[in-house]
Amino acid sequence: GKLPWIQYNDMIVPDSQFCIQFLNAERTIDLNKHLTPTQIAIGHLLRKTVEDSLYWTIVMWRLIFEKTGIVYRKLGLPSALIWYIRRAARSGLWSHGIGRYSQEEVTQIMEADLAAVSQILGDNNFLFGNDLSDVSEFDCALFGQLCQLVWQMPGT
């Protein structure tokens, strides 16, 4: 399956979007009920940007460009396994397409994605407002990606 995933009772649900859909149905939650169709479309596009573009730039930085190996050392991995993981990551990232770009190009993609998110957020606390009642599933998806840049990148 695809990461991230959840286990709910005995059921495994892969992929953040399917996790959210599953929990919405299982718990009869609709964090988007207050949104207009246009806001839902904007949220969908933003989620796809952070999950299908920004995510891969984070992976490139974490697994390929970061040369100190701090990510692997924190996991206590032996050098031979680190070499294998990096090699497999390079191959997978090349197949995906993001691995064909230089560090400078990946940085440009990351900066453009973050600038777009910033422009849409503006001064709001959440995508479509400032109050807790304005939170949508798109805010949750956005947080899931942005928190990696704040708390899970080397040196943070």
Image (tube, rainbow, N blue to C red):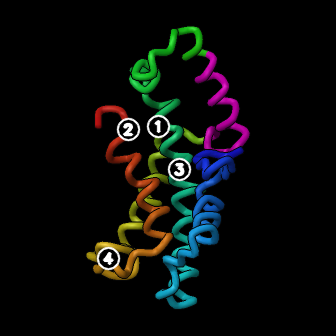
Q: Which residues are magenta?
A: 84-100
Which three-letter amino acid code belongs to the residue tagged 3?
Tyr
Residue at mark 4: 132
Residue 14, position in %: x, y? 66, 50
> Residue at 37% of width from left, 81% of height from top?
134
Dot 3, crowdedness within 10 Å: few (<14), some or many (≥20)? some
Dot 4, crowdedness within 10 Å: few (<14), some or many (≥20)? few
Residue 152, position in %: x, y? 38, 39
- Specify which label sits upstream in the sequence, 3 or 4: 3
Which three-letter amino acid code belongs to the residue tagged 2?
Met
Circles 1 and 2: CB atoms closer than 8 Å: yes
Q: In terms of secondary structure, what is the magenta stretch mainly? A: helix
Residue at mark 1: 61
**SS class, disc 2:** loop
- Specify which label sits upstream in the sequence, 1 or 4: 1
* Real-space Cα separation, disc 1 to disc 4, in angstroms: 33 Å
Residue at mark 3: 55
- Specify which label sits upstream in the sequence, 1 or 3: 3
Q: Is residue 44 left or right of residue 118?
A: right
| Mark sitting on residue 153 | 2
* Real-space Cα separation, disc 1 to disc 2, in angstroms: 8 Å
Circles 1 and 4: CB atoms closer than 8 Å: no
- Specify which label sits upstream in the sequence, 2 or 4: 4
Closer to viewer: mark 3 or mark 4: 4
Q: Is residue 144 magenta?
A: no
Circles 3 and 4: CB atoms closer than 8 Å: no
> Residue at 58% of width from left, 75% of height from top?
28
Residue 100, position in %: x, y? 64, 39
